[in-house]
Image: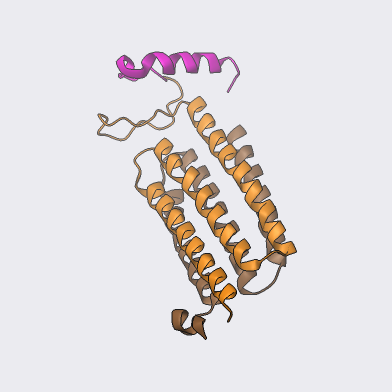
Amino acid sequence: MSDTTMITNMLTIMLLLVGVFFMLAGTIGFVRFPDFYSRMHATGKCDTLGEGLMLVALIVYGGATFVSVKILFLITFILLANPTSTHAIAKAAYDVGLEPWRSFDSEEVAWLNTDNTGNTGNASNTGNSGEGRAGEDGGEGR
Amino acid sequence: MTGALLFGTIGMVDVFLAMAILIVMASFVSLYRGIEGPGIFNRIIAVNVIGTKTIVLLVLIGFIYERPDFFDIALVYAILNFIMTIAATRY
C-alpha cells in the first residue's frame, strides 16, 4: 500500500465519519424536536450536508473515473432537489395551517386545524400575520 | 505495510459496511417518526429522509460489491424521491 493510497483512504474515512455524524445528528433532531418545522430544520440541512460529504468521500475513494462523474451528478441533483422539496413541504404545511410551536404552549399544538387559523387564542402574538396569510391563500382554493 | 499499522486487517470494504449499518440504524430511527409522528407532514418528511439515506446506502452497496449498476439505481431513486415529495405536497 503506497502513501497515496493511504492518504486517500484516510481522507475517505474522515469524510465518511463527518458525513455519518451529520446524518445521525439530523436523525436525532428529527426524532427529538417538538415541532414539524423544527424537525424539518434538523433534517433539511443535516441530511443534505451529510449525504454530500459521504458522496464526496466516495468520489475521493473511487478516483477520476466514469463512476465519479455519476456520483457528481448525484450530488448536484441532491443539492438542487433536497432544499426544493424541503421548501415545498414547509410551504404546503404552512398553507394548510399548521402552526409553529411556541414555548408557552405546554400542551401539544393542534395539528392540521384548517378552519380557524389565526383565531386560536394566541392572536395577540402572531395572529395578524397568520390570518393575513391564510386569507390571501384561501382564494387559491388550496 | 504502513496501512496495516493503522487499520490492522480492516479493509475499506469493512469501513463502507460499518457506514451502511449506521445509515440503516438511522433509517430505522427515522421510521419511528414516520409511524408515530402526528399529522401527514411528519410522515411525508420521514419518507423524504429515509429516501435520502437510501441513496447513500445504494452508493455504498455499489462500492462494497464493486458493481457500478447501483449508481444508476441511486440516480433514478433520487429523481423518484424528489418527484414523489413534490407530488405529495401538491395534493
Q: Is residue B86 left or right of residue A109?
A: right
As drawn, A2 above or below A24:
below
Q: Residue furthest front?
A: A3
Q: Is residue B82 visible?
A: yes
The image quadrant where one finds the N terminus of chain A is: bottom right
Nearest the viewer among A108 and A125 is A125
Total marks shown come to: 0
Q: Quadrant of residue A34?
A: top left
Check residue B50 for magenta coloring: no
As drawn, A75 above or below A60:
above
What percent of the width, then of the height, locates residue A125? Answer: 31, 18
The image quadrant where one finds the C terminus of chain A is: top right
Q: Is residue A39 left or right of residue B56?
A: left
As drawn, A141 above or below A84:
above
Q: Which residue shows up at 63% across the image and 44% down it?
A: B82
Tell me which secondary structure the magenta stretch mostly adopts: helix
Residue numbers of the magenta segment: A117-142
Q: Quadrant of residue A66?
A: bottom right
What percent of the width, then of the height, locates residue B5? Answer: 45, 83
Q: Quadrant of residue A58?
A: bottom right
Q: Which residue shows up at 63% across the image and 51% down it?
A: A75
What percent of the width, then of the height, locates residue A42? Answer: 43, 44
What percent of the width, then of the height, locates residue A36? Answer: 42, 38
Chain B takes which shade in the image? brown
Q: Which residue shows up at 41% across the image and 47% down it?
A: A30
Check residue A122 for magenta coloring: yes
Nearest the viewer among A74 and A60 is A60
Chain A takes which shade in the image? orange
Q: Is residue B27 visible?
A: no
